[in-house]
Image (cartoon, coloured by chain):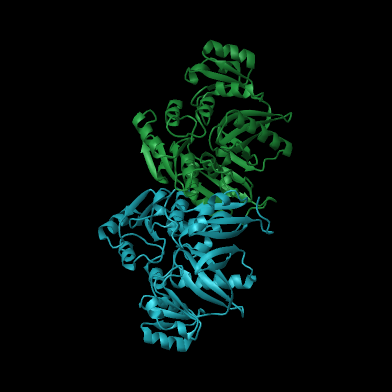
Chain colours: A green, B cyan
Amino acid sequence: MLAPGSTIGILGGGQLGRMLALAAARLGLKSHIFCPPGDNPGSHVCDSITLAEYDDAAARARFAAAVDVATYEFENVPVDCVAEIAARVAVRPGVEALRISQDRLTEKNFLAGLGIVTAPFASVDDAAALTQAVARIGLPAILKTRRLGYDGRGQSMLRTVLDVPGAWERVGASPSILEGFVDFEREISVIAARGIDGSIASYDPPENLHKDGILAISRVPAQIPDAIAREAAALTSRILTEMDYTGVIGVEFFVLKDGRLAVNEFAPRVHNSGHWTLDACAISQFEQHIRAICGWPLGDTARHSNAEMQNLISADVMQWSALAVEPGLCLHLYGKDAPRPGRKMGHVTRLFDKSGTLVR
Amino acid sequence: MLAPGSTIGILGGGQLGRMLALAAARLGLKSHIFCPPGDNPGSHVCDSITLAEYDDAAARARFAAAVDVATYEFENVPVDCVAEIAARVAVRPGVEALRISQDRLTEKNFLAGLGIVTAPFASVDDAAALTQAVARIGLPAILKTRRLGYDGRGQSMLRTVLDVPGAWERVGASPSILEGFVDFEREISVIAARGIDGSIASYDPPENLHKDGILAISRVPAQIPDAIAREAAALTSRILTEMDYTGVIGVEFFVLKDGRLAVNEFAPRVHNSGHWTLDACAISQFEQHIRAICGWPLGDTARHSNAEMQNLISADVMQWSALAVEPGLCLHLYGKDAPRPGRKMGHVTRLFDKSGTLVR
């Protein structure tokens, strides 16, 4: 167990790194953020910063020497960078979870290997393969780059055969997968943590609503039977254990119309759909991740309140002063400079007591 | 209203400054801490630091120029320092609240001027005056230095006349007051805020237990009739309005055996007995203070859970790993180096639902 006073290294300076650093501070831990120059909201709340590109070997060595454990706040940090740091200091979760989740095809094959249902998928390595994949998967379907896509980027929706020509080019003519649609009733996610001792703790799954490919709202509890919540937690446990994972993971599920669960994708990090835990639980997903990577016992995932988290995307953040006066609302702003389209600028959580009444 | 992205200047680098900086960060605000060199837990979580003595005029000018509003996290920051900064940038709460609360005699006279009951008191400026004061106030009584005392320091208990000789020397032979004892049933406090528009919002008063002159436990709700809670809030409002105060104040009350309220003292800052608001309310006292000094509307003070806050004093902090596994417990460690006697190293909050059941 890393003692209070130890230093957590965080690869990435975004809002997730920021909220991890704030959670670490609450436990008496210091944070050291490694990120390239730019608008890095995480860098305002940490004890030390390494401002460098991820391929800067000297910076990586300095960072590794300065921290007691390292983690990453986003899944697109280069595997090489993490592997090199992991040779010098523990990185949790490790290289393997990153390698799997960076590539949609690897991720889908990993899940299939565990017997976990996903949307139908096919590898697409060129325009000709896309035509074959469409023939096999059917339409509508969505073409996604295997790597570096998030929040709807690097994706092309194929509703009819008229959308197929040019789709390969629209996603950048890079290795991709075609995903079929599943007939789902709702989307939920499981935010769970695995400790260094293999113990696992899950929060109750929120129900998630997306808009333009970006999470808009997470509500907890989800309107699902307990058996489905338990099944989602059990599938998440298998994923965590198979990867010998340490830390928090976010696993997105489709609840199918026939009641089965399919995994959409997972992120080897704290997850946007778990932000409500900051305000509705004694121990947030951010503290839980810090506990796990420090080798501390996992915390209690009980929820004292029901919650609805709403993202503030781009210009939504201009409503901050109106939101600030809303009773029972917890305002979180990330300190980013510019509200570019699609950029997550903050979120709010509305708390309700367990009967559904707004907490006032 | 200061917009997100603005910089809050905080005089003092202790745990209160640290928790203010963390609350500011949640609202997208930056923090700049001014503190003398030393073990400054606030300095690990802020965007900028001015490490200088409070009488360093050049440092004060640089600090004032770098921040959009300033505040202080402890009442013993020199009035001169605050006055000079206040000539350059808004300092909230202002110089007046600091001037009053830095001197126990001025504070008692201020309260008496508002017709607020306090313990009987007498000014003691030398050993002879102490004898006269004892004759007037009676024993037991407590001799306290007028300035720079906190957490039981600079105090001498006089139980019998045998304790009187030497007491003046024991408190450092500096201007003091003798305070009589009041026959109280319990101690409560009001954590309240006054906005820049004069609006006032109070949290429900916690009941406080002290040990060796230091706060040990705060429990909310206090076991008091609603009428007493309302009266305590009303007295606090008068204090706030009289000082034309902006920010959070902590006012300590004795609930007398006859049901009346007497003010023990107040602190012109966030208060240890309000730490439970971090975990039991949508908006903590720290966020409330930041809102007030930024000219934002005050937040809702509703409590979603009942709570018991326990300070971790000195070696108590060594229990951190056992506390970390306790369900429903929120652990806060301040990141201080050395657990010296009497030093506040952290606190824990246990959350209960409003029926009194531990939140799990």
In this rendering, position of residue A355 left or right of residue B186: right
Visible in this render: residue A313?
A: yes
In this rendering, position of residue A259 left or right of residue B263: right
Q: At x 64% / y 17%, what residue is drawn? A: A138
Visible in this render: residue B297?
A: no
In this rendering, position of residue B158 left or right of residue A276: left
Q: At x 47% / y 52%, what residue is drawn? A: B23
Q: Position of residue A261 (x, y in %)?
A: 68, 30
Residue extending farthest front: B162
Q: How many marks?
A: 0
Q: Position of residue B76 (x, y in %)?
A: 38, 66
Quarter of the image holding residue B177? bottom left
Residue extending farthest left: B58
Viewer-closest of A281 and B158: B158
Image height check: is B158 above or below A339? Answer: below
Image height check: is B238 above or below A143? Answer: below
Viewer-closest of B165 and A88: B165
Viewer-closest of B159 and B279: B159
In this rendering, position of residue A328 left or right of residue B50: right
Q: Position of residue B309 (x, y in %)?
A: 56, 59
Viewer-closest of A38 and A96: A96
Q: State the quadrant of the N terminus of chain B.
A: bottom left
Q: Position of residue B152 (x, y in %)?
A: 46, 70
Q: At x 30% / y 60%, what residue is drawn? A: B53
